[in-house]
Image (cartoon, coloured by chain):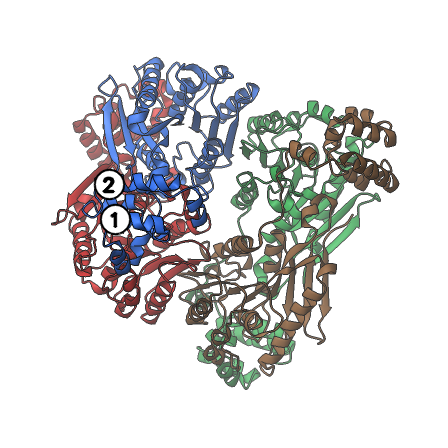
Chain colours: A brown, B green, C blue, D red
Amino acid sequence: MKSMKHFEINLGKENVKLAGYLHDLSEELKNAAIRPAVLIFPGGGYFTCSDREAEPIALAYMAEGYQTFVLRYSVGKDIPFQESYEDAIAALTYVKENSEKLRVDSEHIALVGFSAGGHLAAAVGTMSMVKPSAMILGYPVILDATGELIGKEIPGLDKAVTEQTPPAFIFSTSNDMIVPIENSLKFAAALNEKDVPFEMHIFSDGPHGLSLAKPLTSNGQKNMVNPSAAKWFEFSISWLKSMWGDFFAEDTDELEMKKNGISINTPVRLLMEETQCSKILEKYIPDIKEMLAANPMSGQFSVIIMNHYSPEIITDEMLKAIERELEQISK
Amino acid sequence: MKSMKHFEINLGKENVKLAGYLHDLSEELKNAAIRPAVLIFPGGGYFTCSDREAEPIALAYMAEGYQTFVLRYSVGKDIPFQESYEDAIAALTYVKENSEKLRVDSEHIALVGFSAGGHLAAAVGTMSMVKPSAMILGYPVILDATGELIGKEIPGLDKAVTEQTPPAFIFSTSNDMIVPIENSLKFAAALNEKDVPFEMHIFSDGPHGLSLAKPLTSNGQKNMVNPSAAKWFEFSISWLKSMWGDFFAEDTDELEMKKNGISINTPVRLLMEETQCSKILEKYIPDIKEMLAANPMSGQFSVIIMNHYSPEIITDEMLKAIERELEQISK
Amino acid sequence: MKSMKHFEINLGKENVKLAGYLHDLSEELKNAAIRPAVLIFPGGGYFTCSDREAEPIALAYMAEGYQTFVLRYSVGKDIPFQESYEDAIAALTYVKENSEKLRVDSEHIALVGFSAGGHLAAAVGTMSMVKPSAMILGYPVILDATGELIGKEIPGLDKAVTEQTPPAFIFSTSNDMIVPIENSLKFAAALNEKDVPFEMHIFSDGPHGLSLAKPLTSNGQKNMVNPSAAKWFEFSISWLKSMWGDFFAEDTDELEMKKNGISINTPVRLLMEETQCSKILEKYIPDIKEMLAANPMSGQFSVIIMNHYSPEIITDEMLKAIERELEQISK
Amino acid sequence: MKSMKHFEINLGKENVKLAGYLHDLSEELKNAAIRPAVLIFPGGGYFTCSDREAEPIALAYMAEGYQTFVLRYSVGKDIPFQESYEDAIAALTYVKENSEKLRVDSEHIALVGFSAGGHLAAAVGTMSMVKPSAMILGYPVILDATGELIGKEIPGLDKAVTEQTPPAFIFSTSNDMIVPIENSLKFAAALNEKDVPFEMHIFSDGPHGLSLAKPLTSNGQKNMVNPSAAKWFEFSISWLKSMWGDFFAEDTDELEMKKNGISINTPVRLLMEETQCSKILEKYIPDIKEMLAANPMSGQFSVIIMNHYSPEIITDEMLKAIERELEQISK
């Protein structure tokens, strides 16, 4: 059995860790062999990296089909912004450079950051040479003045927006008592001035640090649950799909399947309807008719699937031979 | 860094594998230390265990906070039903017996099965001594007559329902060409007769094998995408929550926090507002005021979180001492 | 100003009243000149016609673009079923025969009935010569045995289903204490046997008489509010759209608008970009350039809209002349 | 039969018309006798009042239970802003002053305006003495500079916000080519500066004039359909409910009904279970037991409902007498 890979690596420094959550690769999910990705920077005032904005976020995007990564970057009162920033760039570079191995579509990588992690994501989006394809910013710190709140000198990112800044999705609450809403408003104004596409949802009510705004990320605090603000997540998915499309799903009713040509991906049931094809199958799998009679449901599977699950019935060699012969016909 | 555990174990037989997907345990997600669980039986006509109904389903429930498990049970034309059935019982027993280690709420374990996997789930729910707390059945095989379609003798589960059968959630499509909709209808009628609570969504249109009915589980086939039928998943979550409740989220605004008593879970900012408490903190963390002045955002964290992230500032011993002294006050 | 028509008529008998709620006809909503319709039969045990299942339902469908009708049919302990049934047929016949005047698409009329009203809707759908295009049945009475509950002899409609019965959408709750869920289950089984398409949502929990299951139809009773069951309404809309399509919305970006030919529906701004067209406009509206310079936003309106709102600027005669001349060009 | 009232009145001027859409008053919808209201100002560049932003919007809010009003205000190139503004104030004043007759909760009236109508709504919200309780602004014109686009001198409303300005809900699209998004951003910033609560949804994509962003308001133009932006409507409802609450729905299971005291609103079935009450009923309705035996479903109705539908069985006098006697008991 194959299944998802979960790994953790150090990026140069001992305390800087990148976690990867990678979907299984399956013959039955061919349209999702390569996947878009999100790289998540949890918040925590450049003081910690909060668990509430780490794995639960990764799992939410993973359920939507993304390869996901969480970075624990350098934090602490004596750590200058530059150090966290370099960690973030290193992580994005790692995902990009290893995209083939990680089965990531390198053109479709979004940074997702919350609070100070939102500042970090927006910093990479605006200031770095290495850029993500999109930014998703939850109640982000943007302004240099807000740096005072966290006792750290940080760059004001509203001033750093350029025409090269990737599209941004922002969500926050208008009564956030910790990071003033000016941070979101001024970033949106700056994006707009440079014609950078953006989407922004400012909910009327909710404290700083909502994460998914659901009981499961509330740590038991009722004010961290907000069904209206919780919609930010599905809006972020719609927004990514509006730019990148969804997983490929072609128009394949059976007629088109035939039109597209017969192959080892065609359900066996359809192959048996074509004399030429049924002869090929019977040549390699003499008791194919008995098999189908005994188990009609198996006819909906292709020979490639049969080989995958029953290599004792259809060996790799048989599969290759069938493939070769079917190719002759479809030409 | 801690993060999710992914494991795979054999359950007695070489080809029978149980995969577990376990959330990280975090001080910041105290209300989710113990979690409800789903154990998934993929479909495949008792001939294969389809990847399309395995990991994507596990990830979808995981994103909603569940511990999730996928069983690859014995399949194949020469495997009698009884063997698959025993695998299923072994898997459920494993999860129950190891619930503490797996951080699973043993009273809240649902079986989730699709097609033949739905038959397997319903078989355990109706016939076994070891029972799940709930069953979620996607386009399930129920009737013995439908067994002919898969060339195998299987028990008819509509006749197996008793008062002890756990509540069931069923979804299917009325024009399913492979597993006739009578399977769902007759199971619902049987549940009803024994006063077993059930919920059933029969969508008007969609082929057999929809899985999540989204592009990401479509394997590229457009007919496997159905936004209306895709709602089954969120209905299954609402249904589980209606029975089991959601993750605990108490009514904690600051006033209540004070009322509930002061503890090492109280944000430091609040503790500093009470003379008695601020004295205790200053005793153990002499520069606490400077810390908060330099980084006001850090005030929203509790000392338990500070200990977790900055054990060099607040050691385990200090934490225990602070806890003891705060307990004296709140009495 | 034009706006919606609301009317009430008697259908032969004094106590039998049909209320119609008709959308305004507007030049700006050309794709909705003719609309699908729903004819609503409130429930009330053939004893009353409940307001809770009358106007609030009509308004919900009206907001989705439907012409809507509510029938108060003959009820009371001495009224035989046949009388209510004839009222229902009379109402459907009225809507069909007056479809042009009512701007109803006579091919797309659904009956919507609740409880006893669901029985009445299903009776017309199965037994009558005059048939609706679809049936939407909320917690319907179907079985003759259930007639005992309401002290009246009624036909069992599960036995009345034929191949001519139109598609049905059913919703109910499995723990309905008043109308047993067998009513829904047996009707679905009967539809399935005759290959009549159907969709059915049986929610696990909720009392009889949920109506929209929202506070606004609760009459203050909390048990009549159920956010999960309240989804039945949007499912009914999706179901109707899956059969009938949505309001026409063609692919009209400006390029296509030009390709489709220039007409009095083309925004003035675009017409002015074509020398031939701008000459025509200037001929009839000499100060058109000044008008557009003074109010650039007006350029997005077509001359037909301008005639509609400012007949003193563009008279009916001018509109006809412009139309003729533009037609010459587009040929 | 009673049902909704639809009326149109002139407000002083011939071309200025206020349309009202009022729900039926029903004994069965007692919790909705008085309702919150919306007063809608369609857009059209102060040049027309667009039908696309008039009745369809009124019907959408009406379906959610609101009393709704649409104002066609003075428009045209020679009409100064002041005149439209006075019409708007007159309409709001009319609704407030007639709130009792209109069954409107005068503390819960929202203005809803689109484009130029959004400017008008925001003008009343910021500049007028007569104020609404909330403003819902769709792709609004706010800035005086944007007035040039419509060839008219208009006040800049970002400068008019005060602490007395009511809460605002804003939605728009970031790539609106007609009304620059600065209008929304600067209004939000101004609201924030005066601590006025607000919610704002800026969708990434969509042309000016989306209305409901659904096919039914598209006038056939595909670019006017946007399922993501169409969510603005339900967000506006959630926002209003977060401030005003929903229709009252008390915690009434039967036990509480008894606890709350027995009345003419109590289902007859429950009254019959109490000897004292059943005696009263039998006194006035001698054959009540036979009635209930013949039609058990009727027992779920109260005597007030029975009087409403069957005044020949329970006359007004009988109702009053029963009420008096029941009151004696519950004391």
Residue lying at the far left in this picture: please name it.
D12
Disc 2 vs disc 1: Cβ atoms closer than 8 Å?
A: no
Judging from the image, what secondary structure is the residue with disc 2 in?
Answer: strand
Front one among A310 and A110: A110
- Of the residues shown, which amino acid type is indicated by label 1? Lys
Task: Return the residue at label 2.
Answer: D22
Q: Nearer the viewer, mark 2 or mark 1?
A: 1
Quadrant housing residue B131: top right
Structural crowding at the residue carrying mark 1, measured as other residues with C-alpha within 10 Å and reported as few (<14), some (14–19) or many (≥20)? few
Front one among A102 and C192: A102
* Residue B36 in view (yes/no): no
For the point 54% across and 69% down, the residue is: A164
For the point 41% across and 37% down, the residue is: C247
For the point 24% across and 39% down, the residue is: C3
The chain that hosts pointer 2 is: D
Please determine whether, in this image, residue C124 is positioned above or below residue A238.
above
Task: Return the residue at label 1.
Answer: C283
- Of the residues shown, which amino acid type is indicated by label 2? Leu
Structural crowding at the residue carrying mark 2, measured as other residues with C-alpha within 10 Å and reported as few (<14), some (14–19) or many (≥20)? many
